[in-house]
Image (spheres, rainbow, N blue to C red):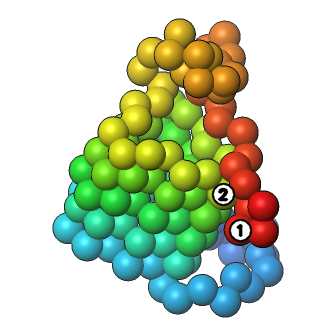
Amino acid sequence: MLGKEPKFNLHNRRWLIRTGGAHLPPSRLEHCDIHDSLIAEGTFVDDAKISRSVIGRGCVLSPGCVVEDSIVMDYTVLGPGVKIRRAIVDRHNIIPEGVILGEDPVADRRRGYHVDKSGITVVPRGLTRLG
């Protein structure tokens, strides 16, 4: 989905991708460094760096966050200084200030996350707003 000519192109007029409306405001991007990434509606990014990543709806990326080669799913909050590399973070998660994911597989496993044999860290779904 990323790059100048993605193999799975969301903007291909011959194969329209339709989604249900989220009824969220547009994304708000403040002092960001974003490269080759997709940012969904309702997301607030404040003084963060994002590269080669997909950020879902309603996410919050706090100052000092760095997200590389990752997928952060809907309604996830990344605290200040969080660094995520080569990870998939499922929805409704709150990653506390200063946490580093995807750089130390042993530490990620100790936190209870799955690390596949290619080195991708997978964070399971967090509690929903009702949970």
| Corner quadrant of residue 30 | bottom left
Report the front residue among 64 and 55. 64
| Disc sitting over residue 78 in the figure | none
The disc at residue 92 is 2
Q: Is residue 60 left or right of residue 97?
A: right
Question: Residue placed at 25% from the left, 50% from the top?
Answer: 64
- Judged left or right of residue 29, residue 130 is right
Q: Amino acid at mark 2?
A: His
Camera sees residue 84: yes
Position in image of residue 81 (x %, y %): 29, 45
Q: CA distance from mark 2 to mark 1?
A: 8 Å
Residue 32 position, x and y percent, is 25, 62
Q: Residue at x 72, y 54 (%)?
A: 127
Using the image as rendered, state which of residue 53 and residue 63 is in the foreground.
Answer: 63
Q: Position of residue 109 (x, y in %)?
A: 61, 17
Q: Is residue 32 above or below residue 70?
A: below
Between 39 and 8, the residue placed more toward the observer is: 39
Q: Name the residue type under label 1.
A: Arg
Q: Which mark is residue 129?
A: 1
Q: Quadrant of residue 119?
A: top right
The residue sitting at the left extreme is 31
